[in-house]
Amino acid sequence: MAGDSFSGDILLIASILLAAVILLLFLVIRMSASMRRMGRERDAGQGGRQPVEFVVDTFHDLVTKLKEKERELEALRSSAESRAERSESYSRNVIESVPSGVITFDESGNIVTVNRAAAGILGVGADDLVGRPADALGPAISAFLKDADQPETVLRREETDHLAADGRRLRLGFFTSRLRDANGRGIGTILGFTDLTEVRHLRQKIELRERLSHLGEVSAGIAHELRNPMAVIAGYARMLDQAVSGNNAARSAVSAIRKEVDGMNRVITEFLQFARPADMNASPLVDMNALIHDAADSALAGNDGMTFDFNIGDGSFVSGDEILLRQAMLNLFRNAIEAITVDGDTRGVVSVSTRCVGNELEIRVSNPGEPIPDELLERIFLPFVTTKEGGTGLGLAIAHKVVVMHDGTIEARSGGGKTEFAMRLPRSPD
């Protein structure tokens, strides 16, 4: 904008100079007519320059000076344009180099510019967005922008979830501001945003570790208070079983007691496994492909008719505790098998796939079935959250704990006739 103003000032000066020259030429022509009349009376006895020659020389001098001024003005104009281009290029380079997404909109709400970071975060091409309305950015962003075109709205901030074009679930922090010209007039809207997904994951890890730390402090007391009475009940149940060996009805009741005691012991064991701080026995090279097949074989034991569909890629080595990782995979497989088996009837196949995503190994475990409600999906990794009759809700909680301990992430998705768990673990250095 500064370059355009400077060029306008130069053109105004040039116009004034041109008008002055035209006026001067008019005066010279009038003077030359008068001087010709006077010259006829003085021509014979004078040896100096004729008046006409004087006028011509003066005119040439004026034209020469005018051309010099024109060249100076052209140089000034070129210099102003060059400075304006450098300023615009510098501003564009700054916008393209910032790690945050920046998108600008015109007064009609259509996208004008998209920087490199914005296209990368949203998983789309910048050229695919320019000229399109805000709705092309997805419902979360368009909803955030709905009040941004109000003149009184100077700056708004918000944090929300966003589903990227490539299927990634992101946590984005937004801000909007009015875009104004050099005169302060509103000419559009600026949308800036930052990917806070990793920040949220780190926050969740810290919160989980704090909860586990507090839970571990009381776990020993819970084990003592519950396991000792359960052991006494189990002992008396065995004595009763022997005492009523000839009474089938009584033996059936005793058998039910022992079954419930075993169930309670299993819940206590799983709870302590979840709550107790685990020591990592890390190995630099854990072959997740072999570990996945091993855990699948264990999960299939006693589940006749159940099958797995594997789509395993390369680069499967991670650094971590092989025993803990196997437990996490086994819990995921058991959860999938229980979800598609009703009264021994298998309703589908468990699909397992792996792929490398940057420096991480992604493992997906999916099974067909009814979708999990959103309110339950948000709490699926918390202890004792389950949809299965008789389930403890600790299997997925333990799997989540193991993944977090390995600086990984895990998330659940449900819809389209299937439920999928996507786990990511840092890969071993090549």
Image (cartoon, grey):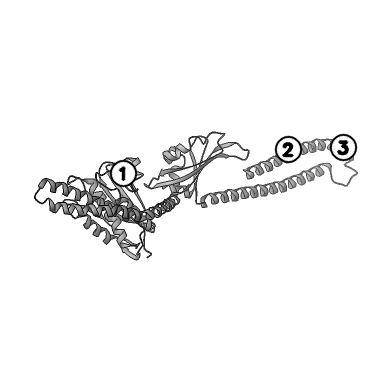
Q: Which residue is drawn at 76% across and 44% down?
A: 62
The residue tagged 1 is 414
> Along the line of sight, which residue is nearer the eye, 133 or 243?
243
Label 2 to label 1: alpha-carbon separation: 77 Å
Asked if residue 38 lies left or right of residue 7, the reply is right
Numbered disc 2: secondary structure: helix
Residue 415 location in percent, x, y?
30, 42
Whether residue 270 is visible to the viewer of this picture, yes or no, is yes
> Along the line of sight, which residue is nearer the eye, 385 or 126?
385
The residue tagged 2 is 19
Give amino acid for label 3: Met
**Dot 2 alpha-carbon crowd within 10 angstroms: few under 14, some 14 to 19, many 20 or more:** few
**Dot 1 alpha-carbon crowd within 10 angstroms: few under 14, some 14 to 19, many 20 or more:** some
Give amino acid for label 1: Ser
Label 3 to label 1: alpha-carbon separation: 106 Å
Quadrant containing the C terminus is bottom left
Whether residue 132 is visible to the viewer of this picture, yes or no, is no
The residue tagged 3 is 38
The tag earlier along the polypeptide, 3 or 1, is 3
Label 2 to label 3: alpha-carbon separation: 29 Å
Numbered disc 3: secondary structure: helix
Residue 55 location in percent, x, y?
80, 42
Residue at the far front in the pictured view: 243
Which tag is nearer the camera, tag 2 or tag 3? Answer: 2
CB under 8 Å between discs 2 and 1: no
Residue 419 location in percent, x, y?
29, 45
Which tag is nearer the camera, tag 3 or tag 1? Answer: 1
Q: Which residue is drawn at 68% across and 42% down?
A: 9
> Along the line of sight, which residue is nearer the eye, 319 or 380?
380
Give amino acid for label 2: Ala
Against 342, residue 331 (above or below) is: below
